[in-house]
Image: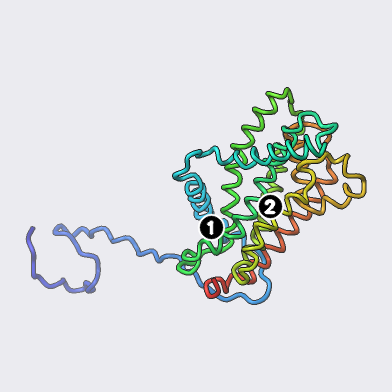
Amino acid sequence: MVVSDAQPEAGTVRGDPPQSVEGVRAPASPPEIEPPLTVLEPQSGWALLDLKELWRYRELLFFLALRDVKVRYKQTVLGLGWAVAQPLATMAVFALFLGKMAGASAGIEHYPLFVFAGMVAWTFFGNTVTTAANSVVANERLVTKIYFPRLVIPLSTVGVGVFDLVIASGLLAVMALSFGVVPGWSVLLLPLVVLMLGVASAGVGVLLAALIVSQRDFKYVLTFGVQLWMFATPSLYLPADALGPTAQTYLPLNPAYGLVLAFRQAALGGTFDWYAFGVSSGVGVLFAIVGALYFRRVERSFADTI
């Protein structure tokens, strides 16, 4: 390589792209692309859900859910067996004490299968509410160091619940075939029922997550409250006919009641209760809207109060 100290020719402007020996202009360097600019401004009052922003952070949502799945089953003896241990253990307790001793199984064919189908749906609902409610506090370092939509954190916990639900549903299918139960056309409604279960549980979890950040008392009441909620959902262990018309009218105001009932009816067959499913779904959507609105209102103070 020969280095020349010659001055630039007349007419050339200092800073122009260099020319080769033959006078051919060298290719210009590509223009610099400025990174996108994100302006963070405080929001006042109630803010609507920013779906575009959530979609922009969809990869973060996926990887947080994947991280939670890996952490849940890392260094465990049973591994994926924990996804079915909880509904199986609860089924055994209900089948023994409520079914045999209290006579709740009267008139119900295959009562253990009846209870297990309900517990699969309830486990998804209850675990999602619990993990979503504690998710923001559990990710304190992530919240205080970088910016992203905080709503991504509780929403990512739904992925863990869906993962457990798929595994438990596989065992439910095996049990149903062993009892000779073949679902009908209503099995096509399962994706819709699971979607509404996810919406309702995420809505309650998001609302509690925002409350726990500011008031830690909710964290200690959460586990006890979820257990009471389970017993206040009689569709887990009793048939709808045993509850009476008045109870069947008002119990769907509990979103878990109608959605658990709909999951069992869709998975095992039988007459689908559209009233209970519709009312419980509506209440679940209402929880989701209220939870998202309140979460958006207080999330700007999370980094200071967490």
- The x, y position of residue 198, in whole percent, is 67, 49
Q: Are marks 2 and 1 in contact (CB under 8 Å)?
A: no
Query: Where on the picture, by quarter, is residue 174?
Result: top right
Give the vertical position of 247 relative to 50 (above or below). above
Give the vertical position of 253 relative to 272 (above or below). below
- The x, y position of residue 114, in whole percent, is 75, 35
User: Of residues 1 and 162, which is closer to you in this image?
Assistant: 162
User: Of residues 82 and 270, which is closer to you in this image?
Assistant: 82
- The x, y position of residue 50, in whole percent, is 62, 63
- Secondary element under disc 2, as helix, strand or loop, is helix
Q: Amino acid at mark 2?
A: Val
Residue 30 numbered tag: none
Residue at left 71%, top 48%?
196
Let me know if residue 189 appears in the view: no
- Say left or right for 20 vs 273: left
User: Of residues 61 and 53, which is closer to you in this image?
Assistant: 61
Residue 199 numbered tag: 2
Residue at left 65%, top 65%?
218
Residue at left 85%, top 41%?
240
- The x, y position of residue 55, in whole percent, is 57, 56
Query: Where on the picture, by quarter, is residue 175?
Result: top right
Residue at left 65%, top 46%?
124
The residues bearing labels 2 and 1 have C-alpha atoms spaced at a distance of 20 Å
Q: Amino acid at mark 1?
A: Arg
Where does label 1 land, which residue? 56
Image quadrant occupied by the N terminus: bottom left
